[in-house]
Structure formats: structure tokens, C-alpha cells
Image (cartoon, rainbow, N blue to C red):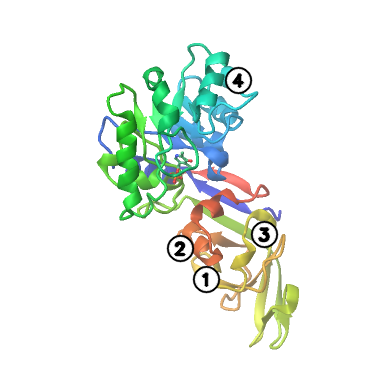
Amino acid sequence: MSQAILNINTDAIFHNWRTLDEQSANNVETAAVVKADGYGLDAGQISGLLSKKNVRTFFVAIAEEGIAVRKAVGNTPDIFVFSGLMPNDASIFHKYNLIPLLNSSEQFMRYKTEFNEAPFGIQLDTGMNRLGMEAEDFFPLRDKASCASLIISHLACADEPANAQNIKQLKTFCKLTNGLNVRRSLAATGGTLLGPDYHFDMCRPGVGLYGGMPFKQAEPVVKLSIPVIQSRKVLAGETVGYGGHWTAINDTQVATIAAGYADGIIRAIGNGSVHLYANNIPCPLIGRVSMDLITVDISRLDYVPNSLDLLNDLQTIDVLAEAAGTIGYEILTSLGARYVRKYISG
Ligand SMILES: *Cc1c(COP(=O)(O)O)cnc(C)c1O
């Protein structure tokens, strides 16, 4: 079998959820964001796991993502949809009992026509200028907003604790919502770590659950093992891979492994600082990343391993992101569809 194996440590996910939950007071709920198919780890699996551990609220980006989550968690947990209620969404919201986070007065009118008393939430824009009602949209609806199940907003700079925009958005959120008897949520992972002023009634971390920055204390969640298909000796002066981009200085033992950029292994990591690990021994990635293959200098090993690890506790999603010029979020959500996802505890 040449399928790579993505091991997903479910204990680490729950440990990360609990550590984030401990940042806030007991009366503050900690939800889980499982959009983008659970940050690439399978929204059904992740939400099913967390609901068994009594996580009661989940967030997805679009209504269709709510279907797998509802099937996994049963009828009780709340599932909120960040994009709100779009045209033709009503039947999905009804059937799977999802809650829209209404983003505009237009969505609010649509909600009023399509639903009577079904629960809804509101998303406010407090300065990110991406999604949500602004003050002038919201004020005419403020009285009706007291029936909302939840009012949220999102911070643009929460991964930079010293950034003045955090306090500015916090003040705007308070100004818009103080005095309403509605549950409120402002913090994702970064906001949860900014401290209690940002917690309100609910924190809603995503990336921290999956072991990513800005949650420095996170336990790594994923390990990616890629089978070695072939190994060969490359003589000094010969080149490896497309473009002949890597030249052997000494005779080199090269292993070819079965994954590439079609699996979300971003091509920009080629010929850089990235290693593949044989247990904990780092072997440099050499040459360009191809669509389905990567070449690795395994000269320092005295054997040819069955597989090599691209992601592990030493080379985390954020280490790989740094090498690729991106963020851990993108490494996670790019994890390929060809991998076998295995859920292991411990
Ligand atoms: C993605 C997202 C989250 C979760 O963010 P993380 O940084 O992954 O914790 C929370 N709220 C909104 C509105 C989001 O779009």
C-alpha cells in the first residue's frame, strides 16, 4: 500500500480543548469550531468525539458543513453557521436543525420570512470588515436581537496580544451589545488567550484544538507517515528530481516517498529546511516536491525505512508552515484527501 497515513491523536484534541476551556471561568462555555471539514481532520469525527466529551456547541462556515456535524453529534448540541442564511439554505437549516448567524438586515428579513420562531444568532462586524452587521444595520434590529440565541463578533488581530485593534474591537462589541440579555461570544483561539475581558459567555476556538498557533501550549495532534516506494544510490555530481534542481555533493542514498503537492504538501517547501523523520532522525527533503512524490536524503540511516514522517511532534504544522511561508491553518486544511485518516488515542 502506498497510501500515506495521517494519524490524528484524539486525546490531544480533547486535551487542547480542556486546556483552552481552563483559560476561562466556569460559567463561560467553550465551543468548538469544525469548519473546513474540521480543519482537514474530518468534521464528523472531530465533532462526534468532542460531543461525547460534553462539548455542546459547534460552529461551521457554511450550511452544508452542518450536515455531517449534525449526523455525528445527535440532536442536542447547537450548530451555528457563520455565513448565516443564504438564498435556498432554508431547507438545510430546517432539516438539520442548524442556527444561522445572521450577517445583514437582508439575511434578517430572509430569516423572518423562512422561519418563525426557530433560533437564530447574529454576527456583528466590529472592525474586521469581513462578515457581520455594522452598527447602522444592527441598531434598527436591536430590540428583535434580544430573542437571539447568541451574538458574536470576530477579532482581526487576536494572535498579536499587543495590537491595539483588539481593545478597539472589544469596546465596539460592548457598545453594540451591552444591556441586551443575550449570550455573547467574541473569542476564537487567539481571543481566548487574551484573557477574561474577551470571554463573555462563550469562547469558540478552532485551530488551538488541532494543535496550532497561536496556542503555544497546544499538544501536536497530527502525525503524517508517508511510505517509501523506492530507494537508490545517487552518485556525486548527479541530480535529483524536476529541473535537476538538487545536485549530490557526495554519493547519496535517496528515498522516494508517496505523497506530493497534490496531497497539500506545499511545493514551496522543496529544497528548503524541511526534514522527513525516521522515528526521530531527521533526513533532509531534497529536490522539488512533485505532484505525488518527494525525494529524501536518507544517507544518515543504515537501513531503508518503510515510511518517513513529514509531520510529528518535532516538525509540527507550524514548523512546516514557516518553511512554506504560510500558517498552520493552511497546512491543516490542505491535508490531502488521499491520506488514510486514523484516529488514535494516546
Ligand atoms: C475560523 C473562525 C473561528 C475559529 O478561529 P481559530 O483562530 O481557528 O480559533 C472563530 N470564529 C470565526 C468567526 C471564525 O471564522
**Mark 3 to mark 2: distance in Å?**
21 Å
**Mark 4 to mark 1: distance in Å?**
52 Å
Whichever of callouts 3 and 4 sits on the residue coming sooner in the sequence is 4
Q: Which residue is mark 4?
A: 90
Q: Nearer the viewer, mark 4 or mark 2?
A: 4
Q: Measured along the vertical axis of the image, is residue 5 above or below residue 64? A: below
Q: Measured along the vertical axis of the image, is residue 21 above or below residue 222? A: above
* Mark 2 vs ligand 1: CB below 8 Å: no
Element type where label 2 sits in the image: loop
Tell me whether circle 3 and circle 4 mark residues in contact (CB < 8 Å): no
Coordinates of residue 224 in the picture (x, y in percent): 57, 55
Whichever of callouts 2 and 1 sits on the residue coming sooner in the sequence is 1
Q: Nearer the viewer, mark 4 or mark 1?
A: 4
Q: Nearer the viewer, residue 1 or 108?
A: 108
Which residue corresponds to the image point at 73% horizontal and 78% vertical from the top-left? 244
Q: Which residue is mark 1?
A: 282
Q: Residues within 10 Å of mark 2 (few under 14, many from 20)?
A: few
Element type where label 4 sits in the image: helix
Q: Which residue is mark 2?
A: 314
Q: Which mark is residue 38?
A: none
Check disc 4 and give the amino acid type.
Ala
Left or right: where does residue 7 sit relative to residue 228?
left
Q: Which residue is mark 3?
A: 261
